[in-house]
Image (cartoon, helix red, strand yellow):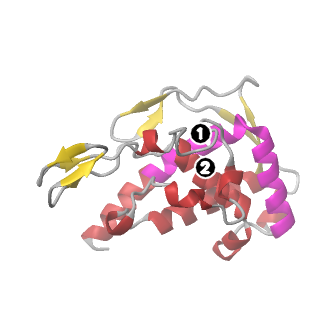
Amino acid sequence: MNCSSQIMAVAGTRTSAASLEWAICNLLNNRHVLKKAKEELDTQLGKDHLIEEPDISKLHYLQGIISENLRLYPVAAMLVPHVASEHCTIGGYDVPPGTMVFANAWSIQRDPKVWDEPLSFKPERFLNGKTEAYKLMPFGLGRRSCPGEGLAYRLMTLTLGSLIQCFEWDTVDGKEINVDEKVATLMSRVQPLEVVMKARPDLDDILA
């Protein structure tokens, strides 16, 4: 494995794990979304087939969950810094060449001028060819976007899909999960996540 591959693997592991933790929080706080995701998996894959990469294209609602989770809780809240190569204007401010520029993805993806009901967890906003996807930027945009974006989407979809297929979920105390966040290198939870997962009755058939 060369150096660039090692960097992508290390960086992708931590960020994907943190994003999946946020996804579990969002699904437990929005049980109707979790129910719809489970119904999609049962309908599209049956109850004797564990999700695999070729199945991803059939699971539109699950993909919408991943996108909506990344919109509300981008793990890299402040995207990788860029440097202005020439004079430009950003939001009415003059930016001279050589200036380091940060994009606040967390703020942009919660902007009520850009998103309908920005604080609501609505995977439906990314379904049926809706155009909201072009406003999503948890990996950046354009030629300088994160090269691991495709891998991250596949990894998170497969992992989250497997957890939904195989387990019944609940919170420890039956209450809504606290979603207070803190930002260091990555945006993570203030409190450690504790949930209860019980094997679904048909787990043996799925794994077989």
Amino acid type of disc 2?
Glu
Quadrant of the rendering where the C terminus is positioned = bottom right
- Magenta range is 15-44
Amino acid type of disc 1?
Pro
Q: Is residue 81 left or right of residue 196?
A: left
Please give the name of the residue rendered at 57% of the width and 41% of the height, measured from the top-left corner: 22
Per the image, is 28 magenta? yes
The Cα atoms of the two marked residues, 1 and 2, are separated by 10 Å
Per the image, is 94 magenta? no
Task: Spot the residue most to the front.
Answer: 92
Q: Which residue is mark 2?
A: 68
Q: Is residue 31 above or below residue 39?
A: above
Image coordinates of residue 46 in percent, x first then y, are: 86, 67
Local secondary structure at mark 1 = loop
Image coordinates of residue 97 in percent, x first then y, are: 11, 54
Please give the name of the residue rendered at 81% of the width and 60% of the height, measured from the top-left corner: 40
Please give the name of the residue rendered at 42% of the width and 57% of the height, measured from the top-left corner: 139
**Is 45 in front, or is 145?**
145
Q: Residues within 10 Å of mark 1 (few under 14, many from 20)?
A: some
**Mark 1 or mark 2, whichever is nearer to me:** 1
Image coordinates of residue 162 in percent, x first then y, are: 69, 58
Image coordinates of residue 8 in percent, x first then y, are: 36, 63
Q: Label the magenta part by its dominant secondary structure.
A: helix
Q: Which residue is mark 1?
A: 118
Quadrant of the rendering where the N terminus is positioned = bottom left
